[in-house]
Amino acid sequence: MIVTAIALLQLQAVPPPPPPQDSLPQVTLAEALRRASRLDPTYVSALGQVGDAAWGRRSARLAFIVPSINFQSSATRYSTEFFNIGTGQLATQIVDAQLSGSYDLFRGGAKIFGLRQADAELDAAEADELAARFRAALDTESDYYTVLAEHELARVARERVRRADEQLAVARARVLAGAAVQTDSLQLLLELTRAQVELLRQDARLKVARLQLGRRVGTAGPVDAAPLDTLPASAIPLTEAQVAEEALSRSPRSVVARAEARAAGAAVATARGGYLPNVTLFGQISTFDDRFFPNATTRSAAGVRITVPIWNNAQREIQLSRAQTNRDVVLATRKDEELAVQRDAVEALLNYNTARASAALATEGVVVARENLRVQQERYRAGATTIIDLITAQVDLAAAEADVVQARHATRLALAGLEALLGRRLFEEPGREP
């Protein structure tokens, strides 16, 4: 009976699959960051908004020195003869051309406040572009680190399968020698089966992570991540108070909130300028003839136009009210955003410190779990412990190794999140410039 059971176990025990030997394209972190930034819709949009805001500021500046200039020309043919002012004769065709220009001497402060608003909008666009760049980098680093973590977890799963297979061979020998009961082999076969199932699941997760990284860098198919060093993470040389202060002063979110508040204030001032008169210099040169490039008659005019707004069906009042409402909302949003960004920065720092400490403790846990497994293996060979204790030690070691991988992954993500919040790299490492 015992020999038959052992033979059955030998048929059911499947050797651990070898590590996959794929020849997938591999990217470094620097390359992944560079390629992903060109494909991220949010970043591309933010970059375009910077260009739009830059042109808005150019326009506001040019309004101080460059007049508005227009040119138009028209040719008209009549069914009967008509007096042509250019030739002074009857004709069926009249051609005219006109060059006109105007310059606003005073527009109720609209030029000054318009420039201030344009400057604030450009600052907001540039800060938003920086934030979008770091958000794209954070998403890319998350996908990149996930591939590395799944690699390590697959290695842990394979090690678990290998240990279970080795212990099953030991248990078989002990059963055949009569030093252990048949259930020992059955328990180890169950552990081997569970380890193999976990390895299959882990390989599937690794494939999905590679596909996601390929999508992030614009490749149709899976892409592997080049390995990074596994040295312990460095401590951030900033206190909680310093992180909160830096987040308030230079975080892209804070910069955007302040710039939007300045733009809203300038918009209110511009709306108030609608109650003041406008003074405009204008000039015009007109030519008339019966053919193109007319030169028969030329007339010019120049003057000053003063426009005094009196009543336009409350459009000024509505515009001013909306501008004031928007300003109040933006100011409240700015205050809330400044408080939120300080809170988020401290939370990100705490998350990093916690993950970093957890990684150090998890590393110590692996040492303890590995030694515990060694002791249990020796005791089991000597018949001084049960198979349950041995299996528990094997499972504990696999869990401890997985904890190290996950803690290292959490540390990297926490650092990337804090850097995205502050809008700068905290450590000068090659390949991590977004």
Image (cartoon, grey):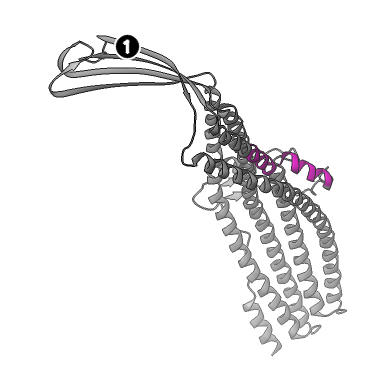
Residue matched to label 1: 299
134 left or right of 23 in image: right
Q: Is residue 338 visible?
A: yes
| Residue shown at 72% from the left, 71% from the top | 164
Residue 427: x and y in percent read: 76, 40
Above or below, comparing residue 373 to residue 136 in the picture: below
Q: Position of residue 120 (x, y in %)?
A: 62, 34
Q: Quadrant of the C terminus?
A: top right
The magenta stretch spans residue 251: yes
Tell me which corner region of the image, top left, top right, bottom left or bottom right, holds residue 47: top right
Which residue appears farthest toward the front when viewing the image? 310
Which residue is located at x 59 percent, y 46 percent?
A: 26
In reply to whether residue 424 is colored magenta, the answer given is no
* Secondary structure of residue under mark 1: strand
- Is 394 in front, or is 409? 409
Q: Amino acid at mark 1?
A: Arg
Q: Is residue 70 left or right of residue 143?
A: left
Look at the image and give the residue range highlighted in magenta: 241-262
- The N terminus, quarter of image: bottom right
Label 1 crowd bin: few (<14), some (14–19), many (20+), radius 10 Å:
few
- In the figure, 407 relative to 247: above or below? below
Relative horizontal placement of residue 196, taking residue 65 as reference (left or right): right
Residue that extends furthest to the left in the rendered view of this protein: 80
Please give the name of the residue rendered at 23% of the width and 18% of the height, measured from the top-left corner.
Answer: 95
| Residue nearer the viewer, 362 or 248 | 248
Magenta span dominant secondary structure: helix
